[in-house]
Image (cartoon, grey):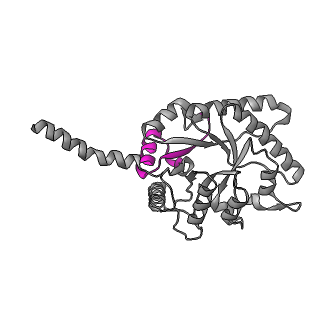
Amino acid sequence: MKKILFLVMAALIAMPNFVEAKSKKRVGLQLYSIHQDMGNVEASLKKVADAGYTVVETLGSPNCFGLEAAAFKALCDKYGLEIVSTHTSIGMDPNNEAAVMAQWRKVFEGLKTMGAKYCVIPGFGLGNDLNYLKQVCDYFNKVGKLGKEYGIMLGYHNHAHEYEVREGQCVWEYMIENTNPEYVFFQMDVYWTTRGGKDPVAYLQQYPDRIKMLHIKDDFVIGASGKINFEAIFKQFYKNGYKDFVVEQEGAPGNSHEARLARMWEGVGESAQYLGNAKFVKKK
């Protein structure tokens, strides 16, 4: 009888941890945020999970931080981290397009192995005129069409300079209007959009079906600066029917490499805590 009572009590004690793990909010991290400390990939992924993240966006494909796609996915699975996307890019080469597309196939094959659904170009040479920009858009359409064969959708991540005006056109808006929504989406970085003089919420309202993913970013720790209305952004994003977002953190302060690494991890944890406690962030 005592043995049965002990087993029941042990099960009850263990249950809250199980429930807590299952009820974590769906908060993602772009692993660029911690790339300075990825020498031990498994140890760092464990830290990411322990901080409260359940989703990651990685760098590269089919290799990630020196690991092949299957091995990287196995580690993410071990720590309950869903791989939603990657940041990677391959430049245009009109004279050798077949070779370029062969490289993209390898990227998409790796992402399919990892179970990702997005491949995001983190920046690209956009030229100096609309004629060149149109060529870039056409290239993205071709790559995105190829990605669709693998069940992967191609995205583009903005910085502030995409909001410059070229020949009377806002570059970012031109890119949206000249890419095929069947093949290309946009990952809005809300920090850089704000720095570019634009309102993320207004763009989410203007292009509700094109912005399928967000980079949640601040001066450093999410929500600490008070400069960005994250609540309004999340509410509109969810209203549009999307849920995939990742935190990106840069610029950890410190007088030494060790101090910067320590502050980096503190910041990653503080950002997860802010979003985990925010009522406007959904669990699923």
Along the viewing direction, whichever of 276 and 197 lies nearer the viewer: 276
Q: Position of residue 78 (x, y in %)?
A: 43, 36
Q: Is residue 97 above or below residue 166?
A: above
User: Residue at 47% of width from left, 56% of height from top?
Assistant: 272
In the rendered image, which quarter contains the N terminus?
top left
Query: Which segment is the magenta one?
Result: 34-62
User: Residue at 69% of width from left, 66% of height from top?
Assistant: 199
Any magenta on residue 213? no
> Image check: 49 left or right of 169?
left
Q: Is residue 208 visible?
A: yes
Q: Is residue 268 above or below residue 39?
A: below
Q: Is residue 273 above or below residue 89?
A: below
Q: Position of residue 206 (x, y in %)?
A: 73, 60
Q: Position of residue 27 (x, y in %)?
A: 50, 52
User: Residue at 42% of width from left, 42% of height from top?
Assistant: 43
Along the viewing direction, whichever of 223 and 208 lies nearer the viewer: 208
**Residue 259 occupies which quadrant of the picture?**
bottom left
Q: Position of residue 25 (x, y in %)?
A: 46, 52
Number of callouts: 0
User: Residue at 69% of width from left, 45% of height from top?
Assistant: 155
Q: Is residue 68 visible?
A: no
Outermost residue to the left: 1
Any magenta on residue 37? yes
